[in-house]
Image (cartoon, grey):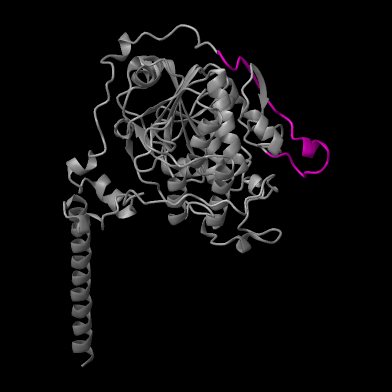
Amino acid sequence: MKIVWKKGFIRLVLVAGILWMFLILIALLFHVWSCQSSVSFFSAICNKDSKVFTVLNNMGIVPEPLNLQHRCPIPLSNDPDKIVIPKGRTPDDIVKDLSYVTDDELWNNGFQRSPLFGGHQNWSQREESFKLKSTMKVHCGFVRNSGAEMAPSDIKYVKKCRFVVTSGIFDGYDIPQQPSNISLRSKKLFCFLMVVDEISLTFIMQNVTVKEDGHGGKWVGIWRLVLLKYPPYDEPRRNGKIPKILLHRLFPQAQYSIWIDGKMELIVDPLLILERYLWRGKYTFAIAQHKHHHSIYEEADANKRRKRYARPLIDLHMKIYRYEGMESWKPGGKTISDVPEGAIIIREHTAMSNLFSCLWFNEVDLFTPRDQLSFGYVVYRLGGLFKFYMFPNCEYNSLFVLHPHTREHSSAVEWVKNITELDGKGSRMKESRGGLGLWTPYPGNLDSVVLPPVARTSKAG
């Protein structure tokens, strides 16, 4: 009886396992089919931003037309070797002399245990920073003794970098992706700099080959790893904004830069990118428009649904912008969109471009780390005086191949549903070094502010 029972149980387990795998296969095939279906009911089921869809896409299971539906040809020059690089720098017509606050006054006066990376910008200083003058001094991160320090060997190396392609990996959830289609001219002209924290450096060294040169530099293929020691923020997403937005502060000798997110593989020669997005139209800043959203309030609503940060703090952030006159985006307005895709940013580091980056970073430092919520607000506050090129999203998707994160990032603050969860000293839910503008009494009555209604315009948004 024992032998018969044992054999029957094994057969039952095998049959159940086969049926379970069959059901999973049917579900995967249905997922792929629904994303291609022209029937609105079934296409609404598809979530192209899901982890399952990303894995299927990278495995090549998703048919080619679906992979490329958000891409379009970029009107690039044919040959990087024939591109003429402009001589000198674009002249600064509005802001001619830009300097930065380097000391935290509260720390110097003994009111703060350690200096904050963004300093203690008060509301009147913030307001003054949006008034453009020939000579300006603004907060712009990198307050003395506040962290985000580079090794001497890296400081020496980046001093020679006038053209840079930069990326960043924080909290160990990506590995460097090697760019492709890079010309020999660009390999000689550009520094490829991958900014990492200590957690990511350890993770990278455990998972890919890292070579060390005779001067202490660490390399993964074409990328030189640049370690930022002493992360200044509690939230890794906020630390990642330092190289992304303040690239001109991190690498002050750079004249031109291309930022790409760490999970992206660049597939277009960087010289062709500079010619297309900066030099051809005489711009100093270029960024893509968001695939789904045009209004910051629509983007904020999507951030709350996807738990990208504490919901009540996103609402407070948006109420401040609404109180300060930021309207919902409308067709035919002053901008193509108020929401960018921030994963690729192309810049010439002029005084005006650098000022915009500083003001953008200050908003990220004061409020939520969701930089897409702040970009359009800073454009609005500068009253159209900051000229930039916001290019089509389909071109943005043609610049790179997207790779999935090695793991999903999450922090406690992203799951907060109401403000009481953040109350109390030492709460693990609350950041202690960033977003302090959300905890500083605002000089205006926000109680009567009503956020604009949001109509969800995209299934994926």
> Magenta stretch containing residue 306, yes or no?
no
* Res 59 seen here: yes
- Tell me the residue at 54%/51% (across/down): 314
Q: Is residue 308 above or below residue 346?
A: below
Q: Which residues are magenta?
A: 93-116
- Tell me the residue at 53%/16% (across/down): 160
Q: Is residue 19 above or below residue 58?
A: below
Determine whether, in the image, residue 412 is placed left or right of residue 270: right
- Image spot of residue 225 (x, y percent): 50, 32
- Tell me the residue at 61%/40% (across/down): 365
Determine whether, in the image, residue 401 is placed left or right of residue 238: left
* Tag count: 0
Corner quadrant of residue 24: bottom left
The quadrant the N terminus occupies is: bottom left
- Image spot of residue 75 (x, y percent): 27, 21
Determine whether, in the image, residue 421 is placed left or right of residue 41: right
Corner quadrant of residue 130: top right
- Image spot of residue 211 (x, y percent): 46, 31
* Res 408 seen here: no
- Image spot of residue 82 (x, y percent): 31, 9
